[in-house]
Every structure is written in C-alpha cells, then in structure tokens.
Image: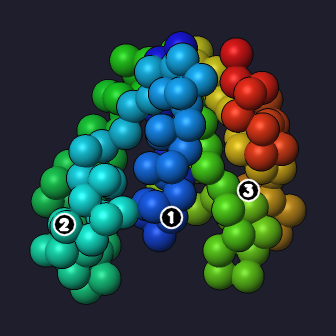
Amino acid sequence: MKITISGSVKFAKELVEIYHKLENLGHQPMMHKDMFGIADGTAQELIDGINLDHSEIKRKHNFIKWWHDCIKSGDAILVCNFDKNGIKNYIGGNTLMEIGFAHVNDKKVFLLNPIPKEVSYSDEIKAMADVILNGDLNKVC
C-alpha cells in the first residue's frame, strides 16, 4: 500500500523511523525528502527557517501543495499523532488539512494513536478517521 506519512515536523525523527518500519512491513511509504534532512540535522538551513518563520518556509517550498499531491497519489495517509504542547495525541492545523485532503480524495485515514480530546476539532477528526492503530503498524491494511 502507498501510504503518505503525516505529522508535525517536530517529530521528524519519529516519522523517519515509521517510514522505515512501513517499508519493512512491505508498504510503500511516502514523505517529503526534506523530512529526512530535518530528522538527521543535515537540512540546517530549512531547520533554521522553520524555527524563524514556519509559515514562510511552507509557502517558499510549497509544502502544503506538495503534501496534497502526495496524498492524492497514494492509497492512504498515516497520521503520526504524538503528544505535543501538553496535548495527548496532538494533531495540528496542517495535519488536520492533510486528513481532509485524504478524506475528500477517498484515501484511507489511519491514526497512529487515538484522537486527541483536547482540541476543538476532535469531531472533525472522528468523522474522517477510518482506523485507529493504537501504535500498532501491523494493523495497516
């Protein structure tokens, strides 16, 4: 299965680990190539730009459109929702949009962890999520 990996850039290292785990399970994971450089620290200019003005980096590199196109080209999206900013299983604005892209394009939506309860848009996530994996990538099918 072609699966777009989605989640906060803060968790780039974890996203790369999940990418490799999905490969080992026989899937074809998809993720922007810059995520690997962010994860290993080699994309320092990009990292600095994200820390300075993340919105400008998204615009300059056309990341939102890139993720949209990636999601459309695959079979599913895997939302890697980890604890962030004191919120358990956080899903931010960008990831919420990516879930929406997947949903309206009839792609399966997997959540790595349960739906966050402390966000105002948990009902929208619930309406679009197909499978909650509870951390078990073996359930991706």
Q: CA distance from mark 3 to mark 1?
A: 21 Å
Residue 41 makes an appearance in the image: yes
Q: Earlier in the sequence, mark 1 or mark 2?
A: 1
Q: Please name which of the two marks, 2 or 3, marks the residue nearer to the observer.
A: 2
Q: Earlier in the sequence, mark 2 or mark 3?
A: 2
Q: Are marks 2 and 3 in contact (CB under 8 Å)?
A: no
User: How many discs mark residues in the rendered view?
Assistant: 3
Q: Is residue 110 above or below residue 10?
A: above
Residue 100 makes an appearance in the image: no
Residue carrying label 3: 121
Q: Is residue 138 above or below residue 16?
A: above
- For label 3, the SS is loop
Q: Amino acid at mark 2?
A: Ala
Q: CA distance from mark 2 to mark 3?
A: 32 Å
Residue carrying label 1: 11
Q: How is the image coloured?
A: rainbow
Return the residue nearer the eye: 9 or 39: 39
Q: Which mark is residue 70?
A: none
Residue carrying label 2: 43
Residue at image coords 61%, 50%: 80
